[in-house]
Amino acid sequence: MQKLEINPEIHSEINNRIIHAKKVIWNLDPADLYEEALFNREGKIADNGALTVNTGKFTGRAPQDRFIVEDDITRDSVFWGDVNMAIKPEVFQNLLNKVVEDLHNKTVYVRDAYASAHPEHRLNVRIINTKAWHNLFVSNMFLRPYKSELEDFAPNFTVICDPDFEADPEVDGVPNKNFAILNLTERIILIGGTEYSGEMKKGIFSVLNYILPHEKEVLSMHCSANIGREGDTAIFFGLSGTGKTTLSTDPDRALIGDDEHGWSDDGVFNFEGGCYAKTINLKREEEPDIYNAIKFGAIVENTTFLKGTSTIDYTDSSITQNTRVSYPINHIENIKVPSIGGQPTNIFYLTADGMGVLPPIAKLSTSQAMYHFISGYTSKVAGTEMGITEPKLVFSACFGEPFMPLPPPEYAKLLGEKLEKGNVNVWLINTGWTGGPYGVGHRMKLKYTRAMISAAMNGDLDNAEYFNHDVFGVAIPKDVPNVPSEILNPENTWSDKKEYKEKANYLANKFVENFKKYESHANPKIVSGAPKKI
């Protein structure tokens, strides 16, 4: 039996814990992990070279089973509630003991990796897996050290993922058999009972979202980012369905990253070394970068093959709508190396407004930028989820609420400071409906959205003439190159102006209601960015 010291540099914080395992395999190359995964019957190889796997019962994160250990470090700093649920240290220790014991007779795959491309803000992560494909996933998604850097690698956070271990809810102090627990004092993420790989990725993202703003005044962001040929950096925030991946992928701009970033005094930097993209209904002609990135080294989750072939059927949602692929970022041709950009020039908040109320493009003041950042608004529409028959308003603080341990106004305050220091333009982009709500109006044309974003990045709107929206107060340009001027004011696209004002007030009230839970943490400047009812 082999032993593995899981965190040699911080003995006092993990009580000198040693993991014993039947076999410990360190830092395998992708080809070797393919062999291990196939030998273990964990997946199959598609004809494009990708490894295909099934994640079992869980095809997505289980936010109701994600906890943070409440102790002297976290008690007064974490924004506790339905998102950041507290768990006692003794519950964590009991489960950790059981998982470590469960590993005694298993082969474990160990991966040493980095999170954060900025060397001053880097987190050294050691990941311990019982699945070879999980170890390939973290190799794809985190930054990969050179072999010379592994010789004296000292982890300062550890992930232990044992999907076959299930808790006993009656005795273990957790509501279900699966769990993902962050212990920010012992610097361990403990995952059990679920094979969904995204729990590891988002666990480390949550850690960075605590450490960087709280300890280093670095803003952590759930966003994509790219950089132009002149070195201008752009950031794209947006929830699912808003077009974040599509609009940040630009043949004339290099991709910095597609999901997780930090913003320091030096500029914007990627947290990751890979991409984790949805594949449902993926087509080469619509998403060529993602389609072409699916090759040897990529992992495709919860898909099936076309009958009688080993060709992936991207249209099949019989397992889940949340089919995904992970791949190293270098599977994309046009990327920034290293994944670091300068101070951002433009920031875009993408929203798919199913109410048809918000303008297709608007410029935000600093106060409005902070307020809308906390709000993180979009809408789901009929057909996206079972039971949704009309637009469903969604608010996700900081455009990534499930991964934000601190009070959202703390992130917004840091954002405001950086905006003013760098004189950054912030734009609200409605990729949703115009001419009426969903079912009456129509979706904003992609070519117009691209033209508006290009105009903002090219400086064409720097000296434009603006007018303010009656309810939301945001500044709307009167003219945008290559965009019909009549669609810029959303009220003008509605046949019934009275109904438009009613819907605008309705949406504004929903913003105000949602914000109430953050008011006690928000300063007056943030509050002043709220919409005004008319």
Image (spheres, rainbow, N blue to C red):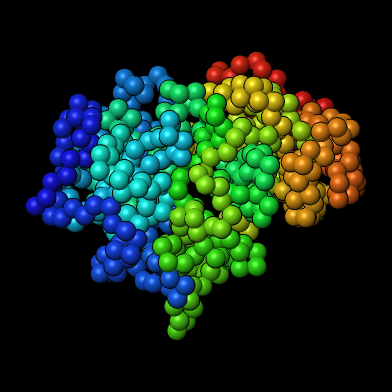
Q: How many marks?
A: 0
Instruction: Examine the rendering and report whether any part of residue 528 can be seen.
Output: yes
Q: Nearer the viewer, residue 151 or 175?
A: 151
> Which residue is nearer to you in this view: 324 or 389?
324
Hey, which residue is sitting farthest bottom in the picture? 308
In the displayed structure, does residue 234 sit left or right of residue 292? right
Name the residue at the top extreme.
524
Determine if residue 193 is in view. no
Left or right, 266 with reference to 505 = left
Image coords of residue 123 (percent x, y): 37, 35
User: Could you say where residue 434 lies in the image, as x and y percent from the top left?
Assistant: 80, 49
Q: Is residue 134 left or right of residue 264?
A: left
Quarter of the image holding residue 29?
bottom left
Residue 469 % position (x, y): 83, 32
Comparing 380 with 301, the one in front is 301
Work out which quarter of the rendered image holds the C terminus and state it: top right
Residue drawn where x is 49% and y is 55% of the image:
330
Displayed quadrant of residue 159: top left
Using the image as rendered, state which of residue 526 and residue 387 is in the foreground.
526
Left or right: 344 as drawn, with respect to 262: right
**For residue 119, what is the image quadrant?**
top left
Task: Point out the residue furthest to the left here.
Answer: 1
Residue 230, position in %: x, y? 68, 42
Q: Residue at x 37, y 60 (%)?
A: 55
Residue drawn 53% across and 69% down?
Answer: 314
